[in-house]
Structures are given as structure tokens and as C-alpha cells.
């Protein structure tokens, strides 16, 4: 998508320098910083400390991390260690394991001398495939938005609520939830987005709001607790969120707070859609609440808030009393019964074992 009129992806390979570059998302929306990732340790830090974040982007970053390490040492031992080092960075987003397993399966049978080039090419392909998946999610999501628009007065705005950042910054490009919004906006379907701020890290306030601003999509930033009230008053036509891991039975793990939005949506007959590329489906798990590991992050994310200070610098302020501990589960699971539909690159399906199996018949449930 565009930043100040220039096309960007969230991660790319600089052909001139031979280096992988990312947008360091810790500083948005106040500063747009690009950094090079040149070592396996740097890739691990960038994922763990959320310089990059969002399930699809974490996967693509890990793939490039393997490629960079293979250029240094392509031995079996290095490949195995790289899988471990990158895999332990964040536990919930399944795209990380998917990308690492994909790279390992490709590289293991190859002679050591061929691994570096093959790894780099596969990392490029994973990035490109993510872009195409997300573009198609937008094409299918647009049809749903058009369907809702068709039931309104001509020209009346479709109000969409979203949580966290499932935008182009969470993927390589387009985003998952936002792809439908971008496609609607480009097609001239009037949309307005309610952007949940998404405490504690405020990905909505910092990143989704920045994306909407950059692309002139009408939006309002709201506190996480406002969604239920807006739904009760008919001000939300649909919810679209992303996901970090969806089970083979259709349970949806996403940023903490998503479950409460789904409950409010059901109570108010508001359709609740989840947008996801197929690498976000974990075909090895069924019951999301019981089986998906939920990342517990540092409690400083709860006790402190980062923002632009009066002197223009970016800093943190403490908002809670000294000594009060924070509890910080980063994700929750929305049971499939609360999900209206899954928007995938192949089309929209029910959040159910049957719906997913019909959409991806080549996948055998384990
Ligand atoms: O902790 P993050 O910022 O990596 O979590 C990302 C999310 O939960 C997003 O909301 C998203 O829905 C999944 S990635 C498209």
C-alpha cells in the first residue's frame, strides 16, 4: 500500500544492498523508520519485540530469517537451530510455524550448497503468495460489503468495526480484514470504519488508524469498550477482524478482546466475519480454547502507555500505581458459533469443520 504516495510492503528484499528491510512498527504513526535485518538474532528480536507483528508478516519475516542464516551457514545443524530460535519468539500466530516448516521441508533434501539460493527464492515466494492471498480476501470481502450496502439506501455508508491491526502492516501487503475495506473504498462503496484502539499495545490506535488516514478511508478511533454500545444503537453493520490462528473446526484466535466483540455482535445480530489466508489455519487443532497457546506478554504493556510526548519525542508514561502488577494475555479465542463466516483467499466459508474442509479439500484433518 502507499506511504506518502509511494508503494511499500511491510518487508522486502533490497536488490541494491542484498539486505532484507522492514518497517519498524514500534514507532508508527509518529515516525516512519526502515531498518535492515542482517542476522538471525536480529530477525528473532524483530519478531519477539514486535518491530514486525501480525501473523502473516511474522511468517514471512521468519522465512527471510531462514534465508539470511542459510547464506551464512547452510548446514543441517544451522537449519535446525534456526527453526528453534525463530519458532520460540512468539507462540500464538501459527503462520510462524507454518513458514518455518515450509522452509525446512524445502531445504532439508537439498545439497548444502544449494540451500541459500533456494531459501531466498522461497522467502520471496512466501511474501508474494501472502500478497495474492490477501488481495483475493479483499475481492471476496468486497462482495459481502456490497451485499450489506444493497440493503441500505443508495449511497448510505456501511459501518464496519475492526479490532487490532489486521491491516497491510500485519501482512506483507493489503492486510486481511482491511483488504475488504480497501477494495470497497476503491470500488466506490462508501464505508466508515470503527477502529478499536486495542489495549494494551494499541495496534488499532497506532497502526490501523494510520492506515485508514493514509488511504483516506473515513474512520473513527474508539475505545475498546465502545463497540457494544454502538451495536445496540445500529451504528455497526458488520465486524471484520483478522486471526492469528484458526482451528480446523473454525474457532478463531485473535487479539485479546475479539471474543467480547463477537459476543456483543451476536447479541445485536451484527454479522461477525474473520478474514484469513490459509496459512493461518492450524489443521492440527480443533478446540481453540483448550489447545491454542496464548502468549502472555510483559506487564509493562499494561502499566505503561507509549505515545508522542509534548516535546515531540516518543516515550512511555506509567498509568498505574507503583507496585500494581499487570496481567497480560495477548490473545483470546472466539468459538466458531459466534462467527458468521471466514473470508479466505478461495472464498467465504462457514466457521466449521465442514466449511473449512469443503474450502480446502486437499487438507486432511489430523
Ligand atoms: O500481537 P500482534 O500485533 O502480532 O497481533 C496481531 C493480531 O492479533 C491482529 O489483530 C490480526 O488479526 C492477526 S494478523 C492479521
Image (tube, helix red, strand yellow):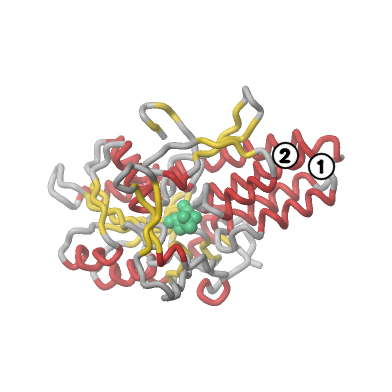
Instruction: Name above or below for residue 72 compared with residue 50.
Output: above
From the top left corner, tell me how far across and down residue 132 is, in percent: 51, 39
Q: Nearer the viewer, residue 128 or 298?
A: 298
Instruction: Name above or below for residue 188 compared with residue 175.
Output: above
Q: Residues within 10 Å of mark 1 (few under 14, many from 20)?
A: many
In the image, the residue with mark 2 has its CB under 8 Å from the nearest atom of ligand 1? no
Q: Nearer the viewer, residue 344 or 99?
A: 99
Pointer 2 or 1: first along the chain: 1
Which residue was labeled with disc 2?
A: 119
Whether residues under marks 2 and 1 lie with C-beta atoms below 8 angstroms apart, the answer is yes
In the image, the residue with mark 1 has its CB under 8 Å from the nearest atom of ligand 1? no
Q: Nearer the viewer, residue 46 or 282?
A: 46
For the N terminus, the quadrant is top left
- In the rendered image, the residue lying farthest to the top is 16
- Disc 2 versus disc 1: distance between alpha carbons? 10 Å
Image quadrant assignment for residue 304 = bottom left
Left or right, 49 with respect to 73, comes to left
Q: How many marks?
A: 2
Instruction: Name above or below for residue 223 compared with residue 36.
Output: below
From the top left corner, tell me how far across and down residue 30 is, in percent: 37, 41
For the C terminus, the quadrant is bottom right
Which residue was labeled with disc 1?
A: 74
| Foreground tag (2 vs 1) | 1
Q: Is residue 176 visible?
A: yes
Q: Residue at x 51, y 35 (%)?
A: 34
From the top left corner, tell me how far across and down residue 300 is, in percent: 46, 64
Q: Residue at x 18, y 68 (%)?
A: 232
From the top left corner, tell me how far across and down residue 94 is, in percent: 58, 59
Q: Nearer the viewer, residue 246 or 204?
A: 204
Left or right, 119 with respect to 309, comes to right
Q: Residue at x 12, y 48 (%)?
A: 153
Left or right, 81 with respect to 267, comes to right
Amino acid at each position: 500500500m502507499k506511504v506518502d504516495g509511494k508503494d511499500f510492503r511491510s518487508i522486502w528484499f533490497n536488490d541494491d544492498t542484498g539486505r532484507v528491510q522492514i518497517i519498524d512498527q514500534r514507532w508508527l504513526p509518529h515516525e516512519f523508520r526502515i531498518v535492515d535485518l542482517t542476522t538471525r538474532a536480529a530477525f528473532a528480536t524483530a519478531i519477539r519485540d514486535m518491530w514486525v507483528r501480525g501473523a502473516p508478516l511474522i511468517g514471512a519475516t521468519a522465512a527471510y530469517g531462514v534465508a539470511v542464516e542459510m547464506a551464512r551457514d547452510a548446514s543441517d545443524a544451522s537449519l535446525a537451530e534456526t527453526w528453534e530460535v525463530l519458532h520460540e519468539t512468539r507462540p500464538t500466530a501459527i503462520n510462524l510455524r507454518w513458514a518455518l516448516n515450509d522452509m525446512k521441508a524445502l531445504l532439508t533434501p537439498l545439497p548444502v550448497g544449494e540451500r541459500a539460493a533456494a531459501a531466498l527464492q522461497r522467502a520471496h515466494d512466501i511474501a508474494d503468495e501472502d500478497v495474492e492471498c490477501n488481495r483475493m480476501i479483499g475481492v471476496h470481502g468486497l462482495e459481502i460489503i456490497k451485499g450489506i450496502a444493497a440493503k441500505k439506501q443508495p449511497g448510505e455508508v456501511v459501518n464496519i468495526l475492526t479490532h487490532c491491526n489486521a491491516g497491510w502492516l500485519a501482512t506483507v501487503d493489503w492486510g486481511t480484514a482491511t483488504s475488504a475495506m480497501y477494495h470497497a473504498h476503491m470500488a466506490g462503496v462508501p464505508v466508515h470504519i470503527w477502529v478499536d484502539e486495542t489495549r494494551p499495545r494499541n495496534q488499532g490506535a497506532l497502526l490501523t488508524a494510520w492506515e485508514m488516514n493514509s488511504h483516506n478511508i473515513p474512520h473513527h478511533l474508539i475505545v475498546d469498550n465502545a463497540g457494544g454500545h454502538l451495536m445496540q444503537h445500529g451504528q455497526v453493520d458488520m465486524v471484520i477482524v483478522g486471526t492469528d490462528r484458526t482451528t480446523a473446526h473454525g474457532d478463531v484466535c485473535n487479539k485479546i478482546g475479539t471474543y467480547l466483540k463477537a459476543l456483543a455482535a451476536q447479541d445485536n445480530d451484527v454479522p461477525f466475519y474473520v478474514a484469513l489466508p490459509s496459512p493461518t489455519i492450524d489443521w492440527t487443532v480443533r478446540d481453540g480454547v483448550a489447545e491454542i497457546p496464548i502468549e502472555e506478554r510483559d506487564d509493562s504493556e499494561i502499566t505503561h502507555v507509549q505515545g508522542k510526548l509534548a516535546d515531540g519525542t516518543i516515550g512511555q508514561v506509567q498509568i498505574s500505581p507503583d507496585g500494581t502488577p499487570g496481567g497480560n494475555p495477548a490473545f483470546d479465542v472466539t468459538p466458531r458459533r459466534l462467527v458468521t463466516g471466514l473470508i479466505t483467499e478461495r472464498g467465504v466459508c462457514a466457521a466449521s469443520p465442514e466449511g473449512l474442509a469443503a474450502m480446502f479439500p486437499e487438507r486432511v484433518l489430523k
